[in-house]
Image (cartoon, rainbow, N blue to C red):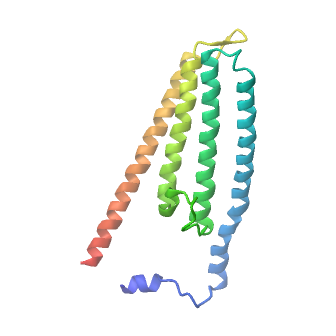
Amino acid sequence: MSAITDARAPSKGRPLRPVPMLIFGSRWLQLPLYIGLIVAQGIYVVLFIKELFHLFMHSFDFSEQQIMLAVLGLIDVVMISNLLVMVIVGGYETFVSRLNLQGHPDEPEWLSHVNASVLKIKLAMAIIGISSIHLLRTFIEAGGLTSGKTLYTETGVMWQTIIHCVFILSAIGIAMVDKLSNASIEGARQQAEH
């Protein structure tokens, strides 16, 4: 180990000084935020059950397009729920405290290598998936009438498409920056070894 690495290595027996302990302990202020997201997850479960019941009750009255839109709505709820799980589990594990799930049969595969940059990329991909569902619903509903009014204007569809493309470009940018920073870290590590 180099002198720099030795200086940064945590001392297991020595307690932290008060200010570093306060700063490090402040991460627990995020706990109520994650609990709030768990409550939001419960609300999404109720919404899913309500939408599923609505689909079941009207499945014989609905056209194929209406059933497709209802199923896309269910998929949208599931994808947002998946996003919540990633934020809750990954965020807590990354920023608050370890969950110590090693060896648990239900440990998410992605959790073993999660860090802030991996979490950002996964969240960006989830947002693109949710945006894709919304855009698909828009394309299906475009030109449809509700109460005599058009649901989407041509300009509205165009802006949704542009926003979706911006999400995709942002995710590509995040992934490229992450790849470049990992490559530079790996290069510095290899240079230090020689």
Q: Is residue 36 above or below residue 49?
A: below
What is the quadrant of residue 153 in the picture?
A: top right
Quadrant containing the N terminus is bottom left
Res. 95 visible in picture: yes
For the point 75% across and 43% down, the residue is 43
For the point 74% across and 26% down, the residue is 54
Res. 152 visible in picture: no
**Whole-percent x and y of residue 184?**
33, 63
Residue placed most toward the observer, 163 or 102 = 102
Q: Looking at the image, how many numbered discs can be counted on the residues?
A: 0
Quadrant containing the C terminus is bottom left
The furthest residue to the top: 148
For the point 46% across and 33% down, the residue is 165
* 158 horizontally vs 54: left or right: left
* 194 horizontally vs 93: left or right: left
Residue placed most toward the observer, 77 or 142 = 77
**Whole-percent x and y of residue 85?**
62, 51
**Whole-percent x and y of residue 146?**
69, 13
Residue placed most toward the observer, 121 or 170 = 121
**Whole-percent x and y of residue 154?**
54, 16
The furthest residue to the left: 194
Q: Is residue 22 above or below residue 180?
A: below
For the point 74% across and 47% down, the residue is 42
* 86 horizontally vs 189: left or right: right
